[in-house]
Image (tube, rainbow, N blue to C red):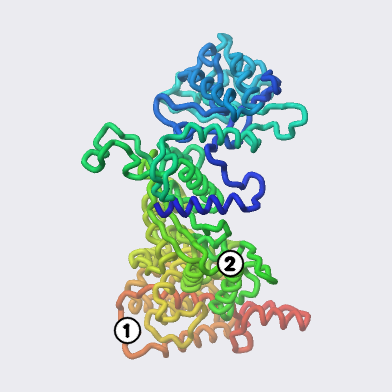
Amino acid sequence: MSWLAKLYETYEAGVKLNLPDGKQLMPISHTLQNAHIKIIIDGSGNFKRAEVLAKTQVVLPATEKSAGRSGRLPPPHPLADKLQYVAKDYPDHGGRKPSFFSGYEQLIAEWANSPYSHEKVVAVYNYISKGRVISDLVKSKSIHVGDDGKLLACWPFESDVERPTPLIFKVLPTLQKDKRINKDKPEVEQGDALVCWQVETDGDLQAETWTDTSLQDSWIQFDSTNVGKSGLCFVMGEDQALATNHPAKLRHSGDKAKLLSANDSSGFTFRGRFTSSDANQAAGVGFVVTQKAHNALRWLIARQGFRNGDQVYVAWAVSGKTIPDPLKASWDLLKEPVVLQTVTVEDPDQSLDHGIDLGGSFALRFKKYLAGYHTKLEANEQIVVMGMDAATPGRMGVIYYRELLASEFLKRVEQWHSNFAWHQNYGKDSHFTGAPSPKEITWAAYCTKLGDKSKAEVNDKLSKATIERLLPCIVDAVAIPRDLVESSVHRVSNRLGLDVWEWEKCLGITCSLYRGTHQEREYEMALEEDRITRDYLYGRLLAVAEQLESMALFFAGERRETTAARLMQRFSDRPFSTWKTIEDSLVPYKARIQSKASGLLDGYKEILDQIHDLFLGDDYIKDNRLSGEYLLGYHCQRKWLRDRKRVKGQWVLKETVESECQELGFCNQNKGE
């Protein structure tokens, strides 16, 4: 019950926050629904007009049973509900679904006649009692009937300027094929339209019932008189009114999966375990506690949840303060402005030097980012990380749960982003230094081109399982699974199966993974000319060969894959024998560069000689398979070459050359030196 207790505490803290309209926590005894029609009436319950709504969510009063209703006899909501509930004349107009008006009328009548009544509830009750809801909506052209007076399942005319398809047929969900009359045509049931109410009276500026806090308080007070029997609440440790049904709709308004449920009192669920079939013997949760806890969870998911299909993760501070999302990439985190006492951190690339000291610059940048959270959060504040997934449409489970102190949580986040930082290339406008997100890591390791889709994607089950394995690596500082790293290395090496942007993205992510899983080797994010390990040096050789051939192709105006790129997979398996093939293929390209820029060729030869001289003993002639370390050497050497020009026998940073040329008033056009 720990997660329920923390969510309850979060609700109590969250209602005290000064949040903008639409961002507040939902009151208890209410639920979230998509509304389709708004009916406007006056204070006496007389119809005025109606509107069809598009993509409008409303917070409506709900009973304990109706908040998670399902089955053949779903209980009504007390105010806003579907037409099959609120319209007495629904069956008279050919409604295809059962009418539940009697239950709805009884519930709203009890509320309207109770000591906790509200003038708007009385107005709605007076109006629905007339039994003219469908007739009034037809007259206002909000819903539509055929010549026989029956509700239409689809618009019978061709949609054009003169007879456009009414909005109601666009906002309602399409029926499944087995429920349609005409199987070949998309159909809707207009009785599924959810009606919300607007009561206009003189001097009332809050006519919409779903935003009227006084009406919400009226319903909460009335609903509290109808709660179940008292018992021990396992969360609070005290006697209070216990809940018999727990809320659903946690991930979205159509979500029916519940974290807590017990609806089998006549089967085998409790036999031999408890003295009776009372579910509260297994776990008793107070009505107010479960309402507040689930509302807090719903609010957190909508506000800062990470979604991976039906899988949801959320991290939060019990105090309600904002915290860094552990499942975001460094790029996404650093784009968020975090205000310190006198410093505002906004630009993710400010103060980063990608050419010289990537590691130190990034570490400083990320420390400044986290300093904002250290300022706002107390060291001993409670942080919770929770993951949920639904095994079936009606059952959801907690797949991950951790409680940490704020200081420990921020330390883990900093450790992850520092250890797994690398220069990433996600596309034309997405270059950054930092750690990738778990979702991107999953993509890099396991994505394939599914079916006829041209874009590589990850199988849904595999994606969920991988994210579930990666989260402890961030929050608990657990080592990344070795198979995931190996899969990424293999996929990058086999570059011919990937588009250019896909391969560039996978390369940066794979380097991040390999560097992070071998922290003891202290890899830098810049070229290490003094690192003499075999795999690192072979990676550097491959990068020089690729750059040399690329430059020769550029001089000739050709665009195609280099020999180094085509043989990369074979090179990673048998580096020595494959290098001989690559080296032999460079002969004509060296001749081409010699004729265009001999100084540039001398620079390439000089680097190749330096790398060869660094091999120890017989490391060079070993033909064993390379580890992922060769990708670090390859990536660093390639970036080193792309950031520099050969000028007067020296390799100089391009920025330095350009700035000197601007000072002199000219720009060197020579492609070589």
Which residue is farthest left?
Answer: 272
| Front in this rendered view, residue 19 or 281 | 281
Helix, strand or loop under label 2: helix
Give me the residue at 39% from left, 41% from top. 231
Q: Position of residue 407 (x, y in %)?
A: 51, 70
From where the camera sits, is residue 38 visible?
no
Q: What is the number of the mark on residue 645? A: none
Badge 1 density bin: few <14, some 14–19, many ≥20, Cα 10 Å: few
| Front in this rendered view, residue 385 or 441 | 385
55 up-or-down from 532: above or below: above
| Front in this rendered view, residue 472 or 147 | 472
User: Residue 355 falls in which quadrant of the image?
Assistant: bottom right
Helix, strand or loop under label 1: loop
18 up-or-down from 181: above or below: below
435 up-or-down from 579: above or below: above
Whichever of labels 1 and 2 marks the residue nearer the N terminus, that label is 2
CB of mark 1 within 8 Å of CB of mark 2? no
* Amino acid on which the number 2 mark rests in the picture: Tyr
In this view, the mark in front (1 or 2)? 2
Identify residue for label 1: 621
Give me the residue at 39% from left, 45% from top. 232
Give me the residue at 63% from left, 69% from top. 349
Identify residue for label 2: 373
